[in-house]
Image: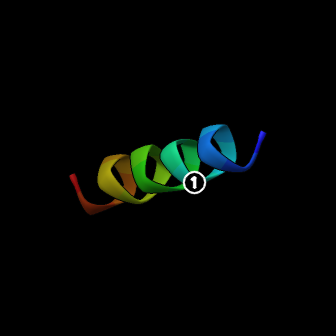
Amino acid sequence: DYDLKLMRQEYYITQQKV
């Protein structure tokens, strides 16, 4: 689940940036 969490965090940050 570590990889999933990392990917999810990046996705969340990317959405916030937009």
Does 6 sit above or below residue 8?
below
Residue under the point 57% across and 54% down: 6
Residue under the point 64% across and 37% down: 4
Does 9 sit above or below residue 11?
below
Left or right: residue 15 versus residue 10 is left
Disc 1 packing (10 Å; few <14; some 14–19; many ≥20): few
Task: Report the amino acid beneath label 1.
Answer: Leu
Colouring scheme applied when the structure was drawn: rainbow
The residue where tag 1 is placed is 6
Residue under the point 31% across and 53% down: 14
Does 15 sit above or below residue 13?
above
Left or right: residue 1 versus residue 3 is right
Percent x, y of residue 8:
56, 42
Q: Residue furthest right?
A: 1
- Tell me the quarter of the picture where residue 11 sits: top left
Callout 1: helix, strand or loop?
helix
Closer to the camera in the image, 18 or 5: 5
Percent x, y of residue 13:
41, 60
Percent x, y of residue 5:
68, 47
Q: Quadrant of the N terminus?
A: top right
Number of callouts in the render? 1
